[in-house]
Image (spheres, rainbow, N blue to C red):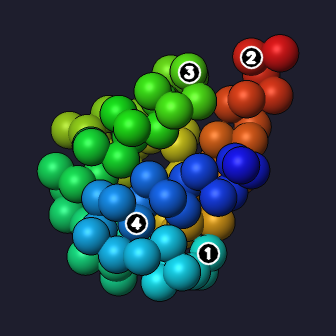
Amino acid sequence: MSIQDKVIAIIAEQAFLEPSDVKLENSLEELGIDSMGLVECIFAIEEAFDISVPFNANEPSASDFDISSVAAIVQAIEELMKEQV
């Protein structure tokens, strides 16, 4: 499973949607994911990819981790994965 497919599956699970309903251009807000759901997504992503996401739930806008869209999250995870190699 690709990074993109895993991220979409995680987000879909948190939003109670089918993965096919999650589009790369969607924001988490558009998918119905609130701040608590966002934290759950981050935890699930960290666990699935064995990475540490630089994200502060208390100050999401101050984070270097871009959560503006599904595509941005996929790209940020790909960058984190490259840094770990």
How packed mark 4 is, by other alpha carbons closer than 10 Å (few <14, some 14-19, many 20 or more), is many
Residue drawn at x 49%, y 65% is 68
How packed mark 2 is, by other alpha carbons closer than 10 Å (few <14, some 14-19, many 20 or more), is few
Q: Earlier in the sequence, mark 2 or mark 3?
A: 3
Residue on which the image places disc 2: 84
Residue drawn at x 51%, y 32% is 48
Residue drawn at x 68%, y 31% is 80
| Label 2 residue SS | helix
Mark 1 and mark 4 residues within 8 Å of each other at the beta carbon: no
Q: Disc 1 residue type?
A: Leu
Q: Could you tell whether 41 is left or right of 63 in the image?
A: left
Rendering coords of residue 16 (x, y %)? 27, 70
Residue on which the image places disc 3: 50
Q: Nearer the viewer, mark 1 or mark 3?
A: 3
Quarter of the rendering containing residue 57: top left
Q: Nearer the viewer, residue 3 or 38?
A: 3
Give the CA separation, mark 3 to mark 4: 19 Å
Q: Disc 3 residue type?
A: Asp
Give the CA separation, mark 1 to mark 3: 22 Å
How packed mark 1 is, by other alpha carbons closer than 10 Å (few <14, some 14-19, many 20 or more), is some
| Label 3 residue SS | loop
Give the CA separation, mark 1 to mark 4: 12 Å
Q: Earlier in the sequence, mark 2 or mark 1?
A: 1
Q: Could you tell whether 72 is left or right of 37 in the image?
A: right
Q: Is residue 19 visible?
A: yes
| Label 4 residue SS | helix
Residue on which the image places disc 4: 12
Q: Disc 4 residue type?
A: Ala
Residue on which the image places disc 1: 24
Residue drawn at x 74%, y 50% is 2
